[in-house]
Amino acid sequence: MFDTFKNRLEITGKLSSVTALRISAGRSTEPIGADLPVIKDALEQPFIPGSSFKGALRSRLESFLRGIDTSLAANPAIEAEWSITNERMNGKTGIKVEVENELKNYPENERAARRDIILTDKILYETDLISHLFGSSWIASKFQVRDLTIVPGTWFGQYQERDGVAIDRDTETAAEGKLYNFQVVPSGTSFDLKIVVENAEKWELGLLMIGLHQFESEQIPLGGGRSRGLGVVNLKIDKMQWFETENDAEKLLNYLQNQVTGNMSNYQYGEEKIEILKKEWTQALIWYLRCLIPGTSVTQTST
């Protein structure tokens, strides 16, 4: 899956907080200050961990895919629901045993080279769709998100502090001694976003586009306090950089040379071209899903 370079997509943009944002660093041990401070970098500036963005994106896409068919996205928190469990991989009748049995059909001097190929094919065949892009215990992720750092000029060195209280469910009043406070990043703060995807299929890129659109349309909140209205964010994609080898060695050689010299303008796409790519990749996803799901028409396209 990764042994041969096929394509690379880089997406850059800005994620802005529409409402105050709370991504907690856990309970503070400091004698003064907020009980629940926000997570900060080495310069004491707030940031959004790439894992938080990626996790929220994956969760939303999992819910969509399970709405179509539960086999398309397993719950990563429950091993019994995984498309490939530890028992299925390593058990007495598991995938690894199946691979060794199949290798007996090949001459002994070919088995070492065949082992990884057969194992990879079996894993990919049984892996749920969401894990093809985001990774699992058995497959590396094709999708990387850098930590989102502050856009200069959008944050002025201050946090807001808000109060919270635990409610006694019997009396429906504030529980004694349960008052706490927490920090939030003010609304209007923006963060730089960079996403890198390598060796993705067109349908996988379509899955990513649908997920990113959820951020563009403010439908995926981040962090804690979401039931209170915190964490509403808006994504604005600035640029996409897309390269595909198309099995052309000369194209790849030019791409590598241009990377070193910094001449990447031929691979940069503006807003108009971005919309074309989004439509192409999303249609590839819909077609792929229609092929997988019985009773759907592969000729029907979205409008």
Image: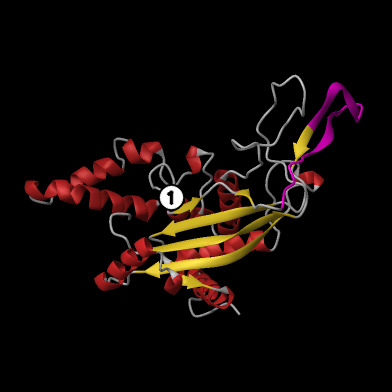
Is residue 149 positioned above or below 235 on the image? above
In the rendered image, the quadrant that contains the N terminus is bottom left
Amino acid on which the number 1 mark rests in the picture: Ser
Q: Is residue 235 visible?
A: yes
Is residue 41 positioned above or below 107 on the image? above
Q: Nearer the viewer, residue 297 or 171?
A: 171
Q: Position of residue 223 (x, y in %)?
A: 68, 43
Q: Residues within 10 Å of mark 1 (few under 14, many from 20)?
A: some
Q: Is residue 287 visible?
A: no
Q: Residue at x 30, y 68 (%)?
A: 252
Q: Residue at x 59, y 66 (%)?
A: 238
Is residue 102 left or right of 230 when viewed as pictured?
left
Q: Position of residue 189 (x, y in %)?
A: 72, 51
In the rendered image, the quadrant that contains the C terminus is bottom right
Quarter of the figure with residue 265 = bottom left
Residue at mark 1: 141
Magenta stretch: includes residue 161: yes
Quarter of the figure with residue 137 = top left
Q: Residue at x 37, y 36 (%)?
A: 87
Q: Secondary structure at mark 1?
A: loop
Magenta stretch: includes residue 176: yes
The prevailing secondary structure element of the residues shown in magenta is: strand
Is residue 227 left or right of 171 when viewed as pictured?
left
Is residue 171 left or right of 192 when viewed as pictured?
right
Q: Position of residue 288 (x, y in %)?
A: 46, 69
- Residue range of the region highlighted in magenta in the rendering: 154-181
